[in-house]
């Protein structure tokens, strides 16, 4: 099971997956400046939602199709420091899209 984590400090934000920096998925799509943010709805949270879902699904189109809903339901509501497991993401995606084609992490 993978663990995504984010922290906000005076130095900025850091988002990791299993302790390694999470790729921003800029090759898929860039929202605004392309930097990560959370706790509100906007470009930074969209970029984070996309990056998490690209990693989770392993499929760019599937990630893009769920990015906005995932951002609004999950990323916009994260605290300053947060952690999401792949199981947390799976559960959230099942609630957002009850008839998914595939919700398992690659």
Image: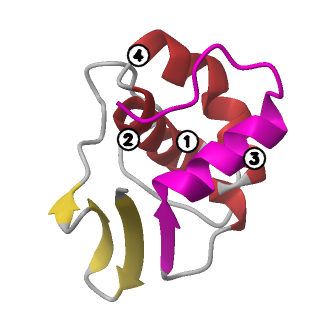
Q: Is residue 58 above or below residue 48?
A: above
Pointer 2 with pointer 4, Cβ within 8 A:
no
Question: x%, y% of residue 52?
Answer: 43, 44
Residue annotated with mark 2: 33
Tell me which residue sits at (25%, 82%) in the image.
Answer: 11
Q: Residue at x 56, y 62 (%)?
A: 38
- The disc, 2 or 3, on the residue closer to the chain's N-terminal end is 2
- Asked if residue 15 is positioned above or below residue 31 in the image, the reply reads below
Q: Which residue is mark 3?
A: 72
Gap between marks 1 and 4, in whole Å? 18 Å
CA distance for labels 4 and 3: 19 Å
State which tag comes first along the sequence, 1 or 4.
Answer: 1
Check the picture and name the quadrant holding the N terminus.
Answer: bottom left
Where are the magenta residues, as a range? 82-106
Circles 2 and 1, Cβ within 8 Å, touching? The answer is yes
Mark 4 / mark 3, whichever is N-terminal: 4
The percent coordinates of residue 78 (x first, y second) are 63, 69
Q: Secondary structure at mark 1?
A: helix
Identify the residue under disc 4.
Answer: 60
- Could you say where residue 60 lies in the image, as x and y percent from the top left? 41, 16
Q: Residues within 10 Å of mark 3 (few under 14, many from 20)?
A: some
């Amino acid at each position: 099971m993978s663990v995504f984590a984010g922290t906000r400090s005076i130095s900025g934000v850091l988002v990791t997956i299993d302790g390694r920096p999470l790729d921003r998925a800029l090759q898929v799509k860039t929202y605004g400046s392309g930097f990560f943010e959370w706790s509100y709805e906007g470009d930074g949270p969209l970029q984070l939602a996309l990056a998490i879902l690209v990693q989770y699904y392993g499929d760019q189109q599937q990630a893009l199709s769920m990015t906005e809903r995932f951002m609004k339901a999950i990323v916009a509501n994260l605290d300053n420091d947060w952690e999401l497991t792949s199981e947390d993401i799976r559960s959230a995606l099942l609630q957002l899209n009850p008839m998914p084609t595939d919700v398992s992490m690659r």
